């Protein structure tokens, strides 16, 4: 797989160097608010300014709910948002208009999609489906039909499942066991692999690393997972999963590499690497420790974690983040390469959205709301200034994916897709 991955890197670099300075930016930011305070808000940022810090309410006339937790684009005009403590999955269109709300998945967390269905992780123990209520001892993954917005099935995984990714018809689910400090079970160390069509559990990979949590970033076959440890004696770590190795049935130890840096907030860059800001906390010392890294997942695998981890981010990003009170998220716009991060400050007042150019030049700071931590860039409809870098034709029958990792059957002229691990523009 090394050759395919390197092709993706070369192509993505060409993409990033061809991005215009004036690329159009359309960004949705979820502000969690304070848990159980019902004060979550949605910010909308466009072309260098905040259009609204209560975008959902402006458009719909009511609040988004309590603790928005994740956001994902299902189709060009359909977006899903988990609203954790309100126990709903809110669906909106690209203009922010509410389309539907699914209310049968309590304590919902993270999202994945294949374009036809939405997959949701939940800490809960029961789920309403079209075939009745299902009950679980541990956590579960629910499957929502993106046309009817009904829950058609749910399957138990591990305790307190967090990050989830869709890849080649399978779902990769990180189990955290995050309630171990208050419930009668241990932290989890496992990754559950489900068949997306049937939701059947096909494999469990034991990483040996506890408490894998937060959003899961995806770069082709590689997944980036964070582990904060136990906040006492077990330090944080980053786990990189090779999904192809998992699906090939290789032994657990050959399916992942564990890195000593943490990746509390991580995202995928245009060159296929992962950007990560680690914020580790110790109850023993009462202190936070931070790291700021770029991870090349292929090189990390090739060297068993000895190489492929650079203690740097583009331009002035590290220097700027170090000036924050409390970093709370990082994101790269997959259409334009512009980079964003947020500062939650003291967690109880409005935070700040930072914007950098693809080269890491600070372009501005913008006031948002409480605990801004989740991002989704909207398609700039061909106005990003990206030119055609390269189109790989090594396998004409290979599956085609959009920039959110969703397999598509039809492509639109002028939009960017991934085929054979390579980004290209359709004509």
Image: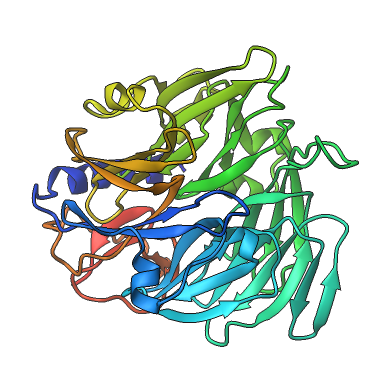
Does residue 123 appear left or right of residue 10 in this picture? right
Identity of the residue drawn at 75% across and 37% down:
189
Q: Is residue 79 above or below residue 322?
A: below
Residue 389 position (above or below residue 231): below
Residue at screen point 83% across, 39% down: 182
Of all residues, the one furthest to the right in this rendering is: 184
Return the x and y of residue 201 as percentages of the image width and height: 77, 61
Label count reads 0
**Identity of the residue drawn at 60% across and 50% down:** 35
Asked if residue 163 shows in the view, the reply is yes
- Spot occupied by residue 120 in the image (x, y as percentages of width and height): 62, 64
Task: Choose top left, top right, bottom left or bottom right for residue 241.
Answer: top right
| Quadrant assignment for the C terminus | bottom left
Q: Is residue 93 visible?
A: no
Residue 202 in the image: x percent, y percent? 75, 59
Q: Is residue 86 left or right of residue 312?
A: right
For residue 415, side relative to residue 17 (left or right): right
Would you identify the image quadrant in which residue 150 lies?
Answer: bottom right
Q: Residue furthest top?
A: 285
Residue 315 or residue 305, whichever sits in front: 315
Q: Is residue 169 above or below residue 225?
A: below
Q: Position of residue 305 (x, y in %)?
A: 53, 22
């Amino acid at each position: 797989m090394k050759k395919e991955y390197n092709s993706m890197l070369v192509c993505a670099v060409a993409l990033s160097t061809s991005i215009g300075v004036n690329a159009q930016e359309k960004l949705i930011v979820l502000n969690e608010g304070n848990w159980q305070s019902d004060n979550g808000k949605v910010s909308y940022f466009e072309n260098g300014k905040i259009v609204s810090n209560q975008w959902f309410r402006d458009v719909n006339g009511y609040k988004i709910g309590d603790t928005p937790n994740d956001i994902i684009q299902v189709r060009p005009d359909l977006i899903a948002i988990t609203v954790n403590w309100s126990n709903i999955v809110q669906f909106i269109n690209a203009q922010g208009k509410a389309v539907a709300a699914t209310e049968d998945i309590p304590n919902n967390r993270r999202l994945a999609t294949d374009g036809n269905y939405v997959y949701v992780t939940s800490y809960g123990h029961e789920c309403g489906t079209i075939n009745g209520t299902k009950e679980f001892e541990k956590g579960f993954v629910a499957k929502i039909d993106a046309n009817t917005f009904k829950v058609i099935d749910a399957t138990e995984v591990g305790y307190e499942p967090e990050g989830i990714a869709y890849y080649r018809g399978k779902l990769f689910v990180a189990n955290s066991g995050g309630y171990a400090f208050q419930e009668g079970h241990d932290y989890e160390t496992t990754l559950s692999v489900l068949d997306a069509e049937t939701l059947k559990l096909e494999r469990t990979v034991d990483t040996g690393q506890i408490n894998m949590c937060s959003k899961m970033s995806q770069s082709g076959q590689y997944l980036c997972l964070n582990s904060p440890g136990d906040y006492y004696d077990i330090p944080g770590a980053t786990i990189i999963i090779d999904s192809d190795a998992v699906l090939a049935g290789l032994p657990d130890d050959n399916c992942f590499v564990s890195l000593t840096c943490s990746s509390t907030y991580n995202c995928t860059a245009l060159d296929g690497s992962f950007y990560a800001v680690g914020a580790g906390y110790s109850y023993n010392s009462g202190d936070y420790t931070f790291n700021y890294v770029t991870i090349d997942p292929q090189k990390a695998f090739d060297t068993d974690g000895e190489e492929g981890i650079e203690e740097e981010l583009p331009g002035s990003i590290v220097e700027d983040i170090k000036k924050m009170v409390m970093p709370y998220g990082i994101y790269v716009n997959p259409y334009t390469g512009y980079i964003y991060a947020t500062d939650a400050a003291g967690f109880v007042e409005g935070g700040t959205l930072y914007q950098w150019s693809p080269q890491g030049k600070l372009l501005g700071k913008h006031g948002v709301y409480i605990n801004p931590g989740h991002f989704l860039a909207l398609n700039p409809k061909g106005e990003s200034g990206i030119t055609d870098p390269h189109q790989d034709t090594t396998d004409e029958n290979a599956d085609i994916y959009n920039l959110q990792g969703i397999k598509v059957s039809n492509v639109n002229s002028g939009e960017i897709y991934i085929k054979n691990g390579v980004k290209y523009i359709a004509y």
